[in-house]
Image (cartoon, rainbow, N blue to C red):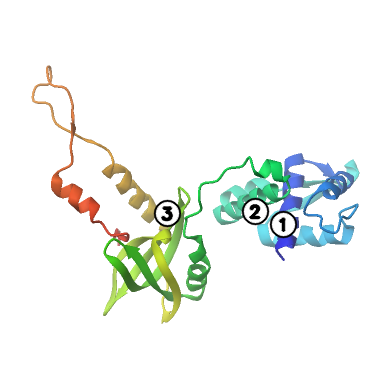
Amino acid sequence: MANLYGQYVWLIDTIRSAGRITKAEIDRRWAKSSLNEKREATYPLRSFHRHKEAIREIFGLIIGCDLSGGYVYYISNFDDLASDGYRSHLLKSLEFSNQLLDNTTDIRRRILFEPLNDGSEHLAAIFSAMRDKLALQITYRSEFGKDPMEVVPYCLKEKNFIWYLAAKKLHGSGLVETEVIKLPELESVVISATKASMPRHFNGEIFFNSYFGQIEKSNVPKLRAPKDDKLAKTKSVKPAKSDKTKQKNAPVIEQLSLF
């Protein structure tokens, strides 16, 4: 199945990069591709038409054919993908993976990555809980030790190669403030039997914009008002000792309630 998705993405990228391309040129490129495990001389015609239909269903992309130009293929609605962030992100990620796999070992050694520590190993469980409207039993690590809790997953955000989860902590009689959980700090994630779902009024885009906005503002140096507008120069003020202590002891899970 992984190789099949790889073929879908390869076909999309091949047609998109060319703009307009004949079946003969697709065949020529497929014969040289490392994804062509069977070493086929052409992209089989029956598979080609099946894959076109699968691409339409999965990615919403329509591969058109210009008969007047001698069976020239093109993607008729690629620009529409920009308005669908989920599909666009998925396709770009798969395209990049395909390009790495489709190049020689020498080229791959020249593509350098940061060590992976984004918490993505927990995504499958979180996706499932969000889809099935269930809570999560999580344990996160902090300087104070390991803290288990039950949360309702609202939405996920990736920023600077780190995944963040906006969630409500279940506590006794009900929910408490919306919290932002950094996935790399999670010790364990288990799907709970507790039924839960995101409220209709919750807007993840607004929530995370406010959250990261607060972080950026907190890093801006504060300015001391000049005593004399003509003589005094603006100087930055060092954070108070109490503020430093508070920042040092801040837990991994940070609260931000908009609702």
State the residue at coordinates (61%, 42%): 111
Residue behind mark 2: 94
Q: Amino acid at mark 1?
A: Gly
Mark 1 and mark 2 in contact? Answer it, CB < 8 Å: yes
Give the total of numbered labels: 3
Q: Amino acid at mark 3?
A: Glu
Q: Give above or below for 191 relative to 11.
A: below
Instruction: Say which element carries label 1.
Output: helix
Instruction: Say which element carries label 2.
Output: helix
Q: Is residue 180 left or right of residue 108?
A: left
Residue behind mark 1: 6
Q: Amino acid at mark 2?
A: Leu
* Front of the two marks 1 and 3: 1
State the residue at coordinates (27%, 38%): 220
Quadrant for the C terminus, please.
bottom left
Q: Percent from the top left, x then y, of residue 228?
A: 9, 22
